Image (cartoon, grey):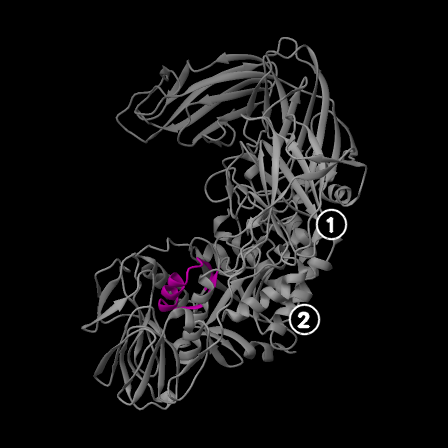
Amino acid sequence: MNRTETIEAVRVDGRGVWIDGSPRTLLCASLFYFRLPREQWRERLEQVRASGYTCVDVYLPWNFHESAPGRWSFEGRRDVAAFLDLAHETGLYVIARPGPYICSEWDGGALPAWLGLDTELRVRQNETRYLERVTAWFDQVLPLLAERQYPANGPVVMVQLENELDFFDCEDRAGYVGALRDAALGHGVTVPLIACSGQGDLAGATGDVDGVVPACNFYPDDDSPDIEAEVRRYAGLVAERGVPLLITETNRRHRTLRRLLASGAKLIAPYLQSSGWNFGYTPSTGNWGRPGNFMSHGYDFGGYVTSTGARRPEYAEAQVLARVLDTWGAQLTLAEPVLADERPACDFPTSSVSAALAFPEGGRLVAVPHLGADPGTAIVGDVPVAVAPGSCPLMAMDVPLGAWGIDVTLTLASADLVAAADGVLVFSSDVPVTVVLDGTRAEVPVSERVTLAGVTVVVLPSAEAARLRSVDADGAARVTDAPRPPAESAPTAVREVRRRFDAAPEEPAGRHTLAPSLESLGVYRGRGAYRTTTDLTGVDELLLTGAADIVDLSVGGRTHPPIAEFGAARRIDVRDVPGSVAIEAVVEIWGHANFDDARLPALRMGALRGLGTLWKVRGTADVSALWTVDGHWAGNPSPTRVLGGWSSTRVAEPVTYCRTVRSPTPSALHLHGVIEPLRVSVDGGAPETVHTENPWVLLPAGTHRVAVTLAHHPSGPGLRAELLTLEAVRDWSCAAQNDELLADFAARSGPAESVRLPLTLKPGEETWLDVDLPPSPEGYLVRLDATQVRVTGWAGGECVGRVWTGDRPAFSGGDPDTLWIPPGWPGLTLLAQGVEGRDAPGIRTLWLEVPT
């Protein structure tokens, strides 16, 4: 395969995407092999193809294939080459997205956890150490993609480099993206290379590197009237670069997708249409603006296929839109976005500007989105037409029909054209359709057909149009049978389980002066234990800093509620604890941060996991007073005020407060009352941003000059400063339980006894339970009727997920309260952990549901 042949087979230019010399509008569904059982790959791919979509986009997560440094796997569920081959057999194109960073609410955004152990390495930068690691990944994965490029040996029509780099503070974007581009070209990738912007910064995503096509991700409010205006702006910006508008991620609702199409998009890839599952310890943490969210194991944002493979109503909407694209064909693909001559007058909420596509052979397609909930009427070309609520019909205006052998002009049609041939026009609509042919007008009811200007006009309800197979010359439509709704079955209660006598083994990980990170102990996914004995005589509280993700702490036999604050400092009351006590902490990795969030230490990209540092608080002092002021009109000598107490008419102007603090030991400055972020500098060093989520600054022993700069906020609550003198808890004995060790133990049978549910647990108590599952070709969803329990489940040799009941952090994504046991994955073993909280821990019942 030579480069010239490949460029001719797949190329992009200002007019659109060209495959085999023909223009194509691509409907693309996200479908991730690593979130599905291998046994379901073909079924899911065929499901996408049957929806009418012609393409899938596929992330390739680096840390899924390199589970430890230099330990590669491309077998079993990691056999991405087999997945790509199946996509090719199914007749789907593929947009491959190998990262190295993918986001995708996946553990660390696919960047391996051990990268953070190298303090000189800087992720997502044009930096030698990082790029050396990326090169090792690309050396593994890019040849697989190059071998499967379209058309010679596979389905790959585009390769995406990086992902939404415009969200990240990359210092040399051109150098970084250029290095990734050169690696791709060096491995023989000749299909178009793209890079997507997450918030519209095209240069920020691509570095404006030659040979890398900018693409856009849009996540608007589906009900926003301004989608068209925003999208049209970016269509114009990419047109200036001589490339089409490629929307590599967007919402899943087809009303919105139609609006994007009418605004000029040539690739439309809703994320996530075909849902999946985060098996194992692979979900991420810290998503979508609220720091500290946990991503659920169910990876489902309401796309047209559920995590277990069931079709949702939106699936039929996909089929109708695909038929519209097929019917109009190349003239729609080559149509150019224009402002409609007149914006339709609507008695319902609609878009703020009208979007239309001008056909190269005359006529146009006008999108009329109905953003309300009640039936409505639009005036289109002086003709009143019915528009169904929640819809966005693509209305044809002034289109010559000679391409179908029909010697008339379609002056207006108020619904989607889904088939045309042999003197027959078929429309899809759930309200009556107004059709004007050569000036002759008719209103055609749903499920009816009429003859107008010698043309048979048929209106099918959208549910039938989605299943349209063919149309006879007399207009009789043939549709496939409607799928039978799945038989509903009542959940089955599990009343008896086998409780194992033994506990999972752990691997000793040495003694350490201070608690090390789990990654330094070789735990990249899983958990570890930290144990020590220390004297707490005269100590009223402990301070825990830098801990992540879930810390179950026991001090002197007292179990504390789980700590899940991602590195924020946490004060722990130990006033009632006797002098010399044992301290034990079990720390579990839920997942590494997939998004770079500066508000909490463990939510930074590349941040490590573990206990952090546990400190004894030896003393506290209020240091809110005696701060000197530098700002506004304050002169020399500097006035002395309480922290935040300077009075000024210049609201929001920065004021700097300075003070000397002294401690013979390490200390922590706690700033109470922080609302807006402020900047703290110690001894003239680089300022550090302090947020309301973690209003602490750690200081080494000694005398320090602290400067706090904040915007003047006279109506704010005011600040108070407290200095805690600290002594580190030392001499930790560590043990590791990585995910493989836990999975191996779960798969083994051991001595056990049968117990009836309900099962009561103590806070901090752990027990392993084996559950017998009746055979089911559909698998099971497992729900817990439980309080104050964390449960991890294994089946088929893999961790299938975790559920946390009772008091817990916020979750994002799919249903956080279920485990999915895919069909053919034998057995179910649960690790149940009692959690300190408002209620007593326990499991009342397990419910088995057949997925529908």
Between the C-alphas of marks 2 and 1, the distance is 31 Å
- The residue labelled by disc 1 is 797
> Magenta stretch: residue 254 in it?
yes
Q: Measured from the top left, where is residue 132 in percent x and y? A: 68, 52
Q: Which residues are magenta?
A: 247-270
> Magenta stretch: residue 256 in it?
yes
Q: Which residue occupies 35% across, 82% down?
A: 425
Residue 829 shown left or right of residue 566 in the figure = right
Instruction: Using the rendered image of the protein, determine whether residue 607 is visible from the camera's viewpoint.
Output: no
Amino acid type at circle 1 is: Gly
Q: First in sequence: mark 2 or mark 1?
A: 2
- The residue labelled by disc 2 is 147
Element under label 2?
Answer: helix
| Quadrant location, the N terminus | bottom right
> Residue 226 occupies which quadrant of the picture?
bottom left
Q: Measured from the top left, where is residue 149 in percent x and y? A: 62, 72
As displayed, is residue 392 above or below residue 198?
Answer: below
Q: Which residue occupies 48% across, 52% down?
A: 166
Foreground mark, 2 or 1, reads 1
Q: Measured from the top left, where is residue 772 in percent x and y? A: 71, 46
Instruction: Using the rendered image of the protein, determine whether residue 289 is visible from the camera's viewpoint.
Output: yes
